[in-house]
Amino acid sequence: MRVVTTAQPRQIDLDVQPSPLALLMLGREADPRSERGVECPGDLPSPSDPDLVERARAAKEKLGDKVFVLGHHYQRDEVIQFADVTGDSFKLARDAAGRPEAEYIVFCGVHFMAESADILTSDDQKVVLPDLAAGCSMADMATAEQVAECWDVITDAGLADSVVPVSYMNSSADIKAFTGKHGGTICTSSNAKRALDWAFEQGEPQQTKVLFLPDQHLGRNTAVRDMGMSLDDCVLYNPHKPNGGLTVEELRAAKMILWRGHCSVHGRFSVESVEDVRARIPGVRVLVHPECKHEVVAAADEVGSTEYIIKALEAAPAGSRWAIGTELNLVRRLANAHPDKEVVFLDKTVCFCSTMNRIDLPHLVWTLESLAEGNLVNRIEVDRETESFAKLALERMLALP
């Protein structure tokens, strides 16, 4: 368990400039045409309030052991300083389940993460998301209705008995429940190969296929880079086209049926980004997340999950040079934590996670003060049937060797 203090790290310039879009992502501007605009039922503190840090600290101290604050690695520094633990989505959900004495789990992340925490925690615990508009564009790319239609297409092709669904942790509770109901498992970016190995062992080796949801890049990279498949073994199911844009013959020939989803942050990195940073920084090692496009992963020196990236920087020798292809808040934090190494952002274009950045200090203060006053706000609660099947899929992942 890592306890994060309120000390402010030394700030390092990573040579990126915020654009108008970046300001929108940071919550400093508004676009009513694109934002869901969920309002807090009460007065949200002003971001200019000089007492926000002290107010958050006081409310958290008043709540004591009743509250447990989780902070995802991609959160802002102003929020992460109040996290009791930090980590990726699954680690945080498990940490929440390991604190049964905490009545309130405040999840500084996005909606699907809070759902997972609710699934894994006890009925007595209440999971709270400081801003209900903090969703995930990738998770939103696969709805329950779309996936049910996809399964109908697979069934009509006579393949339902040979297809095993594997869903990425970055998916809604509905998709996790679908996965559990149809004999599949969940995976993280750390154990995707183990999950796929398990899935292919569930049937005849030459006949079994995997429906991978919702991130096509993690599925493709794992299959090709880690398992030795070819790109031709993978087909892309597009939920916006009739029959997913695939013929029955294409479905039957495929080993991996990839959902047409992606991460809006990691999808921005390009081969040109890799070539540019190599030209600018001699001897640099390029380390990217497996949610990046296949050609970017192929061009990188190392590929790994968020936790892998953090550990790689910790183990790297002093004086080494790194270009990191993942969310900018984390890259900045790593650069500040390792002043003896040169750590740069892979792309010169700013790349914050827009929905992660919706959780800011005013929302956290409002949440903690409301809970301290006995007012339960923004609770995330998964219905019993969905929870049952989703938990089944998660338990299959936990049982992976």
Image: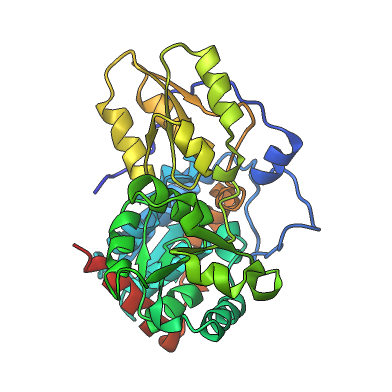
Colouring used for the render: rainbow
Between 252 and 77, which is closer to the camera in this rendering? 252
The answer to whether residue 299 is above or below residue 289 is above
Residue occupying the point 53% across, 38% down: 295
- Across the whole image, how many numbered discs are drawn on residues? 0
Q: In the displayed structure, would residue 98 be above or below residue 384?
A: above
Residue 137 lies left or right of residue 375; in this view the side is right
Going by the picture, which residue comes out furthest to the bottom?
385
Question: Can you see residue 286?
Answer: yes
Asked whether residue 136 appears in the rendered view, the answer is no
* Residue at the spot 43% in from the left edge and 66% down from the top edge: 167
> Which residue is at a point 38% across and 67% down the rendered structure image?
117
Q: In the current view of this chain or complex, which residue is farthest to the left? A: 401
Asked if residue 360 lies left or right of residue 4, the reply is right
- Give the camera-side residue of 325 and 61: 325
- Residue 26 appears in which quarter of the rendering? top right
Quarter placement of the C terminus: bottom left
Residue 278 in the image: x percent, y percent? 50, 18
Q: Is residue 61 above or below residue 147?
A: above
Is residue 285 toward the left or the right of residue 191 in the image?
A: right
Residue 224 is situated, as x and y percent measured from the top left of the image, at: 41, 49
Say left or right for 197 vs 14: left
Q: Nearer the viewer, residue 245 or 15?
A: 245
In x, y percent, where is residue 283? 41, 14
Q: In which quadrant of the rendered view does residue 2 lie?
A: top left
